[in-house]
Amino acid sequence: MSKLSGKTAVVTGASKGIGAAIAKALAAEGAAVAVNYASSREGADKVVAEITAAGGKAIAVQASVASSDDVTRLFDETQKAFGGVDILVNNAGVYAFAPIEDFTEAEYRRQFDTNVLGLLLATSEAAKRFSPDGGSVINISSGATTVDIPTASVYTATKAAVDSITRVLAKELGPRKIRVNAIAPGAVETEGTHATGIIGSDLEVQMVAQTPLGRMGQPSDIAPVAVFLASLDSAWITGEIIAVAGGNR
């Protein structure tokens, strides 16, 4: 039997990159997956098509994690389709790097609304819906919290909050058999790092040079760790932030 047979997962921000890889990996282990997206319907539909073509179950659900109404609807549609929720992956995230002199309140709110408020709203909703058997919450943090990247003060602050929330909720929800862990990826090649010009830049060269394993990460490096944290293989693990960063810290 597959590790996640009979389970249902919600993966936020799953239309591309790390989220898409996690959604497909969870489905490959038997989970039914709600592929959440904010704007890229085409990307989400592609992920769903790949999952169903491989014999899995998936639906695409548009929702902004920064909206409580949208988050409620995301879980309503998931339960309507699959009958329950057992796993939440808080992957939706945004970032932008800028010198502190260019700091703006609008950018602060944009990043915190998705990266922190969105995580809290989704986890609150999931906690209400997990069965008495418990569940698994997997937050996507970042290696940025330990490598201290200049110009990334706002983004790093959001992910430091993710780490703290992970540890607090692990203690708060543990008595209900709900495990809460985080994955902290290092530099990963995604559509986002291509779009922002990191790939092919001096910054990429610098990040690879600082990584003991000598390369950028791929979404496929992150997804198996999410499967591990979603499954009973990690039944005695909660409150941990697991670096998946090629040794860069």
Image (cartoon, rainbow, N blue to C red):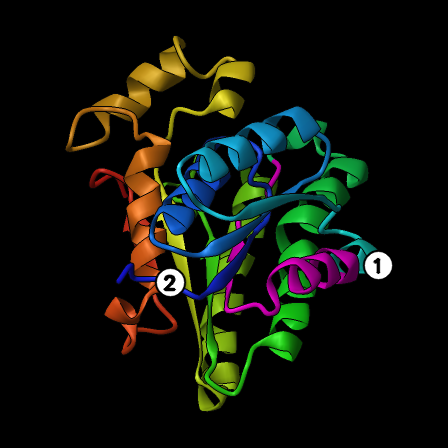
Residue 96 visible (yes or no): no
Residue 173 in the image, given as x and y percentages of width and height: 51, 83
For image coordinates 61% across by 68% down, the residue present is 83
| 85 is higher (above) or lower (below) than 134 | above
Q: Secondary structure at mark 1?
A: helix
For image coordinates 80% across by 60% down, the residue present is 68
Relative to the observer, which residue lies in front, 15 or 247? Answer: 15
Residue 92 in the image, given as x and y percentages of width and height: 59, 45
For image coordinates 33% across by 65% down, the residue present is 231
Residue 5, which numbered label? Answer: 2
Q: Magenta includes 93?
A: yes
| 83 is higher (above) or lower (below) than 148 | below
Q: Decide: few, some or many residues near mark 2? Use Cα within 10 Å; few <14, some 14-19, many ≥20.
A: some
- Distance from the alpha carbon under mark 2 to that under mark 1: 30 Å
Residue underneath mark 1? 69
Residue range of the region highlighted in magenta in the rendering: 72-94
